[in-house]
Image (cartoon, rainbow, N blue to C red):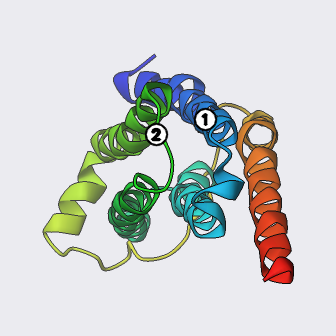
């Protein structure tokens, strides 16, 4: 097995699942601090935005050949994710306790996307050189991968895993926060 394939497997079977588990740990911390009664809808929507920001390049890298277009999207969404993450903590910290466990979860949620991006750059070094040298011609379209990463069932398995550990819990968090906000509004 060549180094690129080892790095791809490391991404697929280590970094991506750990990112999902860190997201679930973060959700448990939000639940423990009763986010719906403290920082509420605004913070939970920022969490959803950050998940979507990382999901977009993740799905693109799993389904399409990484080229200049994909790398631009990866870098752009990573920068936006960092901006929202900063705004999230800045907004939430005066409104609710951010426990040591939540800070640990944030460490993973903040660094894993960067590590994944660096690994994608290393695996696709010639495309990174094309990106920084502005050799973009012929590298700006979505080209499906010839062989699915992780095998034919990986994508569905990973999306199912993420639905259970991140998507459904954060939908629940959004609903919980919106319900409390609506009750507060009705009482006012």
What residue appears at the point 64 percent right and 51 percent down from the top-left corner?
A: 35
What residue appears at the point 65 percent right and 31 percent down from the top-left corner?
A: 150
Relative to residue 10, is residue 135 depicted above or below?
below
Seen from this angle, which residue lies furthest front? 188
Q: SS class of the residue under badge 1?
A: helix
Relative to residue 77, is residue 128 depicted above or below?
above
**On the rendered structure, is 33 left or right of 182?**
left
Q: Quadrant of residue 60?
A: bottom right
User: Which is nearer the eye, 19 or 126?
Assistant: 19
Labels 2 & 1 near each other (Cβ < 8 A): yes
Mark 2 to mark 1 CA distance (whole Å): 8 Å
First in sequence: mark 2 vs mark 1: 1
What residue appears at the point 38 percent right and 43 percent down from the top-left corner?
A: 110
**On the rendered structure, is 97 left or right of 64?**
left
Relative to residue 118, is residue 141 depicted above or below?
below
Q: Which residue is mark 1?
A: 29
User: Which is nearer the eye, 187 or 109?
Assistant: 187
User: Which is nearer the eye, 77 or 93?
Assistant: 93
- Classify 10 Å Cα crowding around label 1: few (below 14), some (14-19), many (20 and above): many
Q: Which residue is mark 2?
A: 98
Residue 103, percent from left and from top = 41, 33
**On the rendered structure, is 62 left or right of 99?**
right
- Classify 10 Å Cα crowding around label 2: few (below 14), some (14-19), many (20 and above): some
């Amino acid at each position: 097995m060549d180094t690129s394939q080892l790095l791809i497997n490391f991404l697929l079977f280590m970094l991506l699942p750990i990112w999902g588990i860190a997201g679930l740990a973060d959700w448990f911390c939000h639940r423990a601090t009763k986010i719906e009664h403290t920082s509420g809808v605004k913070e939970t929507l920022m969490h959803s935005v950050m998940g979507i920001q990382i999901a977009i390049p993740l799905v693109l890298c799993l389904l399409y050949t990484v080229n200049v277009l994909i790398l631009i999207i990866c870098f752009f969404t990573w920068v936006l994710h960092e901006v929202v993450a900063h705004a999230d903590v800045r907004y939430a910290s005066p409104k609710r306790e951010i426990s040591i466990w939540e800070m640990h979860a944030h460490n993973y949620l903040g660094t894993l996307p960067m590590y994944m991006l660096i690994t994608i750059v290393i695996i696709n070094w010639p495309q990174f050189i094309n990106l920084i040298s502005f050799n973009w011609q012929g590298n700006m379209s979505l080209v499906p991968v010839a062989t699915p990463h992780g095998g034919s069932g990986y994508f569905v398995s990973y999306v199912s895993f993420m639905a259970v550990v991140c998507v459904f819990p954060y939908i629940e968090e959004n609903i919980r926060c919106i319900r409390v906000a609506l009750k507060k509004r009705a009482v006012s």
